[in-house]
Image (cartoon, grey):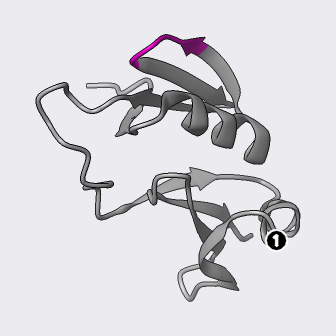
Amino acid sequence: MTVESVSIALTTPDISRSVTFYVRQLGFACALQLKRFARVKLGKADIMLALPRENEAWAGPLFTGSIYLGVDNVDAIWERLKDHVRIAYPIETMGYGVREFGILDDNGYQLSFAQTLA
């Protein structure tokens, strides 16, 4: 088996607000925006945004992990974002050879930006 891509679907109560966050704050491009669904992309990152099912009340994000975005310029991204987004954890070099930091998106999902060190 060969996996050729991974897409992530995140629930949001406000499609427009979430698209604005990903486009303006993080530099994604909006590939599609409908009333109940949108898709934003940056490089190989592909994130789908969808309204909650009509029969479900929005209780905030239920995802307990972190979405990792592998980048080649983590320090530059940190400098650009650190004063404009909610920080989950500050930039640091991990013992496993990765420099990373985490933020929370407009809904509270954790996005981690990570660069593998040589």
Label 1: how many Cα within 10 Å (few below 14, some 14–19, many 20+): few
Q: Between residues 24 and 44, which one lies in front from this camera angle? A: 24
Quadrant assignment, res 30: top right
Give residue 71's position: percent from left, percent from top.
Answer: 71, 52
Please tell me whether residue 68 belongs to the stretch shown in magenta.
no
* Residue linked to disc 1: 83
Q: Between residues 19 and 56, which one lies in front from this camera angle? A: 56
Q: Quadrant of the N terminus?
A: top left
Q: Residue furthest left?
A: 55
The answer to whether residue 71 is above or below residue 85 is above
Q: Which portion, as a residue range, is magenta? A: 32-36
Quadrant assignment, res 29: top right
The answer to whether residue 9 is above or below residue 29 is below
Magenta-drawn stretch, dominant element (helix, strand or loop): loop
- Residue at point 82%, 58% (across, down): 73
- Residue at point 45%, 13% (across, down): 35
Quadrant assignment, res 31: top right
Q: Quadrant of the C terminus?
A: bottom right
- Residue at point 14%, 36% (across, down): 56
Say left or right for 49 vs 99. left
Say left or right for 113 vs 2. right
Of helix, strand and loop, which one carries label 1? Answer: loop
- Residue at point 59%, 26% (across, down): 40
Give residue 37's position: percent from left, percent from top.
Answer: 42, 19
The answer to whether residue 25 is above or below residue 10 is below
Q: Residue furthest bottom?
A: 95
Give residue 11's position: percent from left, percent from top.
Answer: 34, 38
Give residue 113's position: percent from left, percent from top.
Answer: 63, 61
Q: Between residues 58 and 75, which one lies in front from this camera angle? A: 58
Amino acid carrying mark 1 in the image: Asp
Tally of numbered discs: 1
Say left or right for 6 vs 21. left
